[in-house]
Amino acid sequence: MGTTTLLKETVFHNTLTAWLAALAVTLAVGLALFAIKWWLLRRFSTFAERTKTTLDDLVVEVLGQTKTWFAVVMSLYAGSLMLSLPDKAEEFAYTTAIVVALIQGAVWSNTLLDYLITQGASKGEGKTAAIGAFEFIGKLVVWSAFLLLILDNLPGVNVGSLIAGFGVAGIAVALAVQAILSDLFSALSILLDKPFEEGDFVVVDDLSGTVEKIGLKSTRVRSLSGEQLVFSNSDLLSSRIRNYKRMKQRRIVFTLGVVYETPYEKLLRVPEIVREVIESQNDVIFDRVHFKSFGDFALNYEVVYRMTTPDYNVYMDTQQAINLALFQRFAEEGIEFAYPTQTVFLANNG
């Protein structure tokens, strides 16, 4: 029997030539998929090491999650196209390829979601309970969506009624837990937008303290007096929040007054003295000092300077040093600070 005759032999409704062609296509597609994955990973990994952007890191992360079984199944399906198979076998091969491709898509989406949540959360901090919960919810949504797509591609399965049932149940649940969902999405907004983070000192209306924990429903703040303040996440985001940890510089404005009996020459000396005292301090940028107004019992000067550090204790230490230095310099110059007084002038009509 010659080689040509042997290749024409039929095995399972296909000639040996068709089987060899299917094998060649399977190997070629498999090697091509592995080679493309290896080349892209190497290319983007090298590029990621040279750049500071995170997009290339994301590409490397997603490509790294391309599974071996995905390449194997896709290769086998490509090879099966070279064969003449029964209808049921073709349908099985096609369905298997679609299901495997969807599962691989779910893995990629899961990796992308993981990356986005990690980037959105605070860097350098471990996963908080809220971040872990959102990660679980996100993965549940992703896998549920891909599960419905997989079921929709299975022969004889109608997911229309299933989706409708889930939709009605979802609306009912959403209405029942509307307040909880509001706080939940507010927590997600806090974690991603980061108006404040754990450890920040914030002021909300007339309440203030350090953020201890950002939870799914509420945020806990430790006040200066020691008690714990609990804010609903939705109420917190609807309030005006002052985040003092984000302060770059602290602007200080204060007023000092001297008595009306101060000579004109000494009034001119006051701005010079104030400027010298402030500029002698550390972490301070002098702004201005002006004779602002004639008060009820004092000639008022307005003084403005900036602290280059937001630390409140440093600011108070600096202000104390300025006050003491001004007290000493004014005493040396013979300039009197004003204080609430009333002077009665008596007229002699005789």
Image (spheres, rainbow, N blue to C red):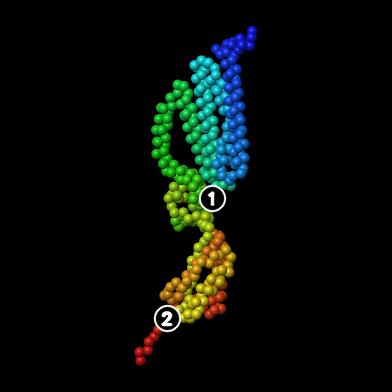
Return the x and y of residue 2 as percentages of the image width and height: 64, 9
Viewer-side residue, 36 vs 182: 36
Amino acid beneath label 1: Glu
Viewer-side residue, 334 vs 280: 280
Which corner quadrant holds the C terminus? Answer: bottom left
235 lies left or right of 65: left
Label ID, residue 312:
none
Viewer-side residue, 152 vs 265: 265
272 lies left or right of 181: right
Can you see residue 35? yes
Residue at the location (61% across, 9% down)? 5
Looking at the rendered structure, the secondary structure element under dot 2 is loop
Label ID, residue 198:
1
Looking at the rendered structure, the secondary structure element under dot 1 is loop
Residue farthest toward the top in the current orientation of the protein: 1
Return the x and y of residue 134 as percentages of the image width and height: 51, 40
In the figure, residue 298 lies in which quadrant?
Answer: bottom left
In the figure, residue 182 lies in which quadrant?
Answer: top left
Which corner quadrant holds the N terminus? Answer: top right
Label ID, residue 343:
2
Answer few, some or many: residues within 10 Å of disc 1's Cα (few below 14, many 20 plus, some between 14 and 19): some
In the figure, residue 43 lies in which quadrant?
Answer: top right
